[in-house]
Amino acid sequence: MKNKGFTMIELLAVIVILAIIALIATPVVIKTINNAREKAFLDDAITLRKAADNYYAESNLTSNQMIPLLATYTNRNVTYCSNRPKLSYSGKNPYSGNIYINKDGTVEMRLFDNKTGKCAVKTKDDKEPHLEKLSESECRLSGKTC
């Protein structure tokens, strides 16, 4: 009577082949996940820029909003200038950073995401934010007040 089943060599060969496939696929999957995180973070930054534009537009229509506005994010919590309305947007807050709305309506921002390790940067002259590889301490606006 013959034994049915796989030999140890056959099982080891299958395991080695699966390990090689996993070694090849893992970096591709990780890169795809990181790209998706970066894109989601950039989309959140664009949403915040649009909220800042809306805030400025509404401030020209009503007298209860004040410009300039400084929003500061720390550990996903936001603080605003005292007695200023909040930015209205849906989405999650960035980990840290600042958004500043100037009196002329231009928006500046530096927002840090701890999962990607990147900073969404928008200067007065930029139309949209872009990602830069900055540390959390470098990803702050300086000299901006209400």
Image (tube, rainbow, N blue to C red):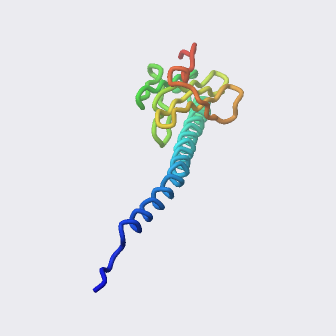
For this rendering, which residue is in front, 75 or 63? 75
Residue at 55%, 36% in the rendered image:
48
The N terminus lies in quadrant: bottom left
Q: Is residue 39 above or below residue 112?
A: below
104 left or right of 138 in image:
right
Quadrant hosting residue 51: top right
Residue at 46%, 27% in the rendered image:
73
Quadrant hosting residue 54: top right
Image location (x, y in percent) of residue 24: 54, 53
Kindly give the residue lying farthest to the front in the view shown: 1
Image location (x, y in percent) of residue 145: 54, 15
Kindly give the residue lying farthest to the top in the view shown: 143
Q: Is residue 65 above or below residue 45?
A: above
Kindly give the residue lying farthest to the left in the view shown: 1
Residue at 52%, 54% in the rendered image:
25
Q: Is residue 6 above or below residue 102?
A: below
Image location (x, y in percent) of residue 119: 56, 30
